[in-house]
Image (cartoon, rainbow, N blue to C red):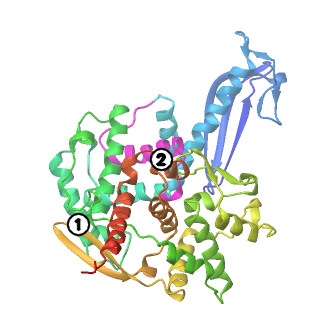
Amino acid sequence: MKIERNGIFLLDKEGDKPDARLRYRIRWGKKHSLSILVGYRVEIAKWSLETQRCKLSTTHGKNKIQANVINKAIEAVENKFEQIFYSFEIKGQIPTPEELRKEYDILTGKAERENNSLFGIFDYFITTVGKQNSWSKATYIKFNSLKNQLQVFNDKLVLNELTEDILHDFVSFLHTPVAMQMSNVTATTGMKNTTIAKKISYLRWFLRWAKHKKYYDGLLHDSFRPKLKGIDGNAKEIIYLNLDEVLHLYKFQFKEPYLERVRDVFIFMCFTGMRYSDVAKLKRSDIFDDYVFIVTKKTVDGIKIELNNISRAILDKYKDFPFEKDLVLPVISNQRMNEYLKEMGKKAGIDSPQRIVYFMKDERIEEVYPKYELLSCHCGRRTFVVNGLYLGIPPIVIMEWTGHYDYKSMKPYTKVVNKLKEKEMTKFNISIPE
């Protein structure tokens, strides 16, 4: 949601006085407006209507306040209102003048945020931390989903009255179909244990932040760790393509041009280890003779990824295509690409049975799917890591390409490779002539 708004700085002139109070007026929606005083007087002759700033190298008022001091205050006012409107946009709500004034007073320290409601503070957390950490749209959706589930669970939650019993009850609520239906109306079961564990990790993040900001004086951010089966990663299946499947897909002739393009982008990910978010914004300026250099969207790290013959061939294939924003590959939306990957895999015969194991409460559930039904953009990155390890590339080198921080994050992949090695070793079980 985008709230259209227009802000302007005005000088409140008083008779023949050479200076005036500086006021900010902002209008939004069809009829809402709010005015606040910036806190400085500005000499009228030294004010620029065009730039909405004090003219450079001027001083103002009896105390000869420097123009740069007032201009910084002007910028701070603009930034605070942008931050406030952004928070309302995330919630899909148009604020009243009273709500806008209240949020502004809280940001400027003129008022304190009420500590009796968890949800107002949660909104503030989403807005401020999201902006500080450059959250993606998907991350905003995850935290707003958590907030909505907390409200359905109990819309009268008080932050400093949270207990372990309350949070255990919340975990039980997440196990119910009601919680799942908030994101999937046709759901008939509750959430998987791994999904609930992720929700709780988000909640603990919020509580740590609230503790640091002194909104919360408890210890649940450290102590609350519910026991959920199957969240240690041991049951997690890594969905990837082996080298034979990758090469088969690379050479497969698709009749549909859109599937060919999706295949090319996916294969590029399989041979570079790049995330969808980074491939989607890869520009020609990121491409060099024998490598690409990217600043990852998720971790904001600078990563150099050397090119191989496959990744280079795909870049060369599209080098003369005039994509928008100087992009280098025909990338479509993540959701649409995931849909087409399944269609692509089915047509190409990527249909080996794939077992999925997960837990719901204490129940172990095992399901088997043809592999094409499980293909997604992230499978490209996983394919790169698993096949890299299988080819004998040291984990530390792969981590330099993928941006993984530690060996713990590589553990699921090394387990897959170890299973592959065990299987390959059985080929040495040959009959010895008597």
Considering the numbered disc 2 on the image, is that residue within a helix, a strand or a loop?
helix
In-front residue for pair 93/263? 263
- Tell me: residue 404, above or below residue 235: above
Which quarter of the rendered picture does the C terminus lie within? bottom left
Picture quadrant where residue 235 is located? bottom left
**Residue at 29% over, 41% down:** 116
Asked if one can make out residue 95 in the rendered structure from this viewpoint, the answer is: no
Q: What stretch of residues is rendered in magenta?
A: 111-138
**Residue at 72% over, 22% down:** 68
Which is more foreground, mark 2 or mark 1?
2
Q: How many numbered marks have been drawn onto this rendered protein structure?
A: 2
Instruction: Report crowding for label 1: few under 14, some 14 to 19, many 20 or more residues within 10 A (C-alpha).
Output: some
Three-letter code, disc 2: Ile
Residue 407 location, x and y as percent?
39, 47
- Left or right of 394? Residue 166 is left
- Tell me: residue 96, above or below residue 15: below
Q: Earlier in the sequence, mark 2 or mark 1?
A: 1
Residue 154 location, x and y as percent?
25, 56
Residue 413 location, x and y as percent?
39, 60
Per the model, the C-alpha gap separating discs 2 and 1 is: 39 Å
Three-letter code, disc 1: His
Which quarter of the rendered picture does the N terminus lie within? bottom right
Residue marked by disc 1: 175
**Residue at 23% over, 36% down:** 218
